[in-house]
Amino acid sequence: MGMESNKVTDTIKFLCSYGGKILPRYTDGELRYVGGLTRVLSVDRSISYTELMVKLGEFCGYSVTLRCQLPSGDLETLISITSDEDLANLIEEYNRASSSMSHPLKIRAVLSPPKSLKKISPPPSVDFSASRSPFVTAESLGNSAAYHYVPRTYSPPIGYPAGARNCSAKGNRYRYHVQHNPRVLYSYSHFVPQSNYRY
């Protein structure tokens, strides 16, 4: 009759700690949970891993990962629970450890936020170095199909006298052809003293 108190109950209890850190104790270096909250969550023994994680998320207010302490273990030997099989093995361990006790043991659980693996990187096609520069140069355009820079050098107009008019003391007006383009004429007045001028 005394063994009836040791019968397996329909519910199991998790002693959940979250929001704190696992740190060594100053006196002996033994690990302990510091800060945060520690609360008890009771669930049906037949609960699935997925259902348990949903309840733990509602319990804490955010998604968590579940690590548990074995009945004979400590915070240094926490095991991760990630499937129905892991959960069933954990419950079985606590059932055996509680068989010789008057009350079932609570499953010690440490809840932590999941580590984010998402990384944001800029698209490889974006050239940030070019976008930062307010100037556009021939070098920055490169082999662009829209722009093609062709360096050119221009020489000053070089001509030769095409004729002379107004031969007087006031001066002579000469017309010069631009080199490589006989159709373009430049004219200017060249003043020469009449005594030194010969036509």
Image (cartoon, rainbow, N blue to C red):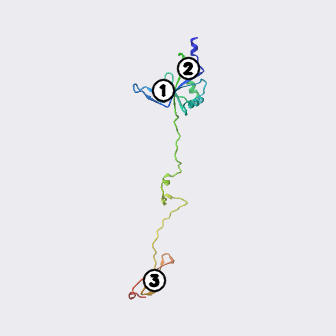
Instruction: Identify the element where label 3 is drawn.
Output: strand
Name the amino acid, label 3.
Arg
Residue at 55 percent of width and 20 percent of height = 95
- Asked if the residue at tag 2 contacts the one at tag 3, i.e. Cβ–Cβ closer than 8 Å, the answer is no
Q: Amino acid at mark 1?
A: Thr
Residue 121 versus residue 2 in the image, above or below: below
Q: In what element is the residue under mark 1?
A: helix
Position of the C terminus, as image quadrant, is bottom left
Image quarter hosting the N terminus = top right
Between disc 3 and disc 1, whose residue precedes? 1
Residue named by callout 3:
173
Residue 58: x %, y % from top left: 57, 31
Compare marks 2 and 1 and give the one earlier in the sequence. Answer: 1
Q: Say which residue appears at 56% left-offset and 11% top-offset.
A: 2
Q: Helix, strand or loop at disc 2? A: helix
Q: Is residue 59 left or right of residue 196?
A: right
Judged left or right of residue 151, residue 85 is right
Q: What residue did someone put label 1 on? A: 77
Q: Earlier in the sequence, mark 3 or mark 2?
A: 2
Q: Which residue is mark 2?
A: 95
